[in-house]
Amino acid sequence: MNVDKLERALAEIGLHGIVEVRGSLAVLRMDEDAGLGDEELRSLAVSAAERNGFTHLALEVVDDAGRAAVHRD
């Protein structure tokens, strides 16, 4: 698994953020969803994750205060 290559691959398709690794899951942390409602963009992002050794890709959109959009106790 290569986080740096995945971050670069995602940036090339317009997804700028930080990738965190949780096992074989890559979590892309971004300030906004960057158009991930588009099926083709999501497919490109998942393919980039798979090419870099990850089995899954998740998106975590953070709010202005740097907290997760969905809060947990």
Image: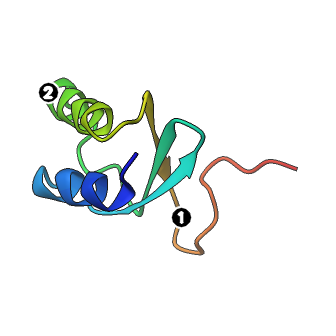
| Residue 2 point in image, percent of width and height | 36, 52
Secondary structure beneath dot 1 equals loop
Using residue 24 as the reference point, say whether residue 44 is left or right of it.
left
Residue type beneath disc 2? Glu
Using residue 50 as the reference point, say whether residue 19 is left or right of it.
right
Res 21 visible: yes
Q: Nearer the viewer, mark 1 or mark 2?
A: 2
Of 59 and 23, nearer the camera is 23
As drawn, 18 above or below 26 = below
| Residue 71 point in image, percent of width and height | 73, 51
Residue at mark 1 to residue at mark 2: CA–CA distance: 25 Å
**Which residue reaches farthest bottom?**
65
Q: Quadrant for residue 55, please give it.
A: top left
Q: Residue at x 21, y 26 (%)?
A: 43
Closer to the chain start, of discs 1 and 2, is 2
Q: Residue at x 14, y 27 (%)?
A: 40
What residue sits right under mark 1 in the picture? 63
The circle drawn on residue 40 is 2
How many neighbours does mark 2 have within 10 angstroms: few (below 14), some (14-19), or many (20 or more)?
Answer: few
Using residue 54 as the reference point, say whether residue 22 is left or right of it.
right
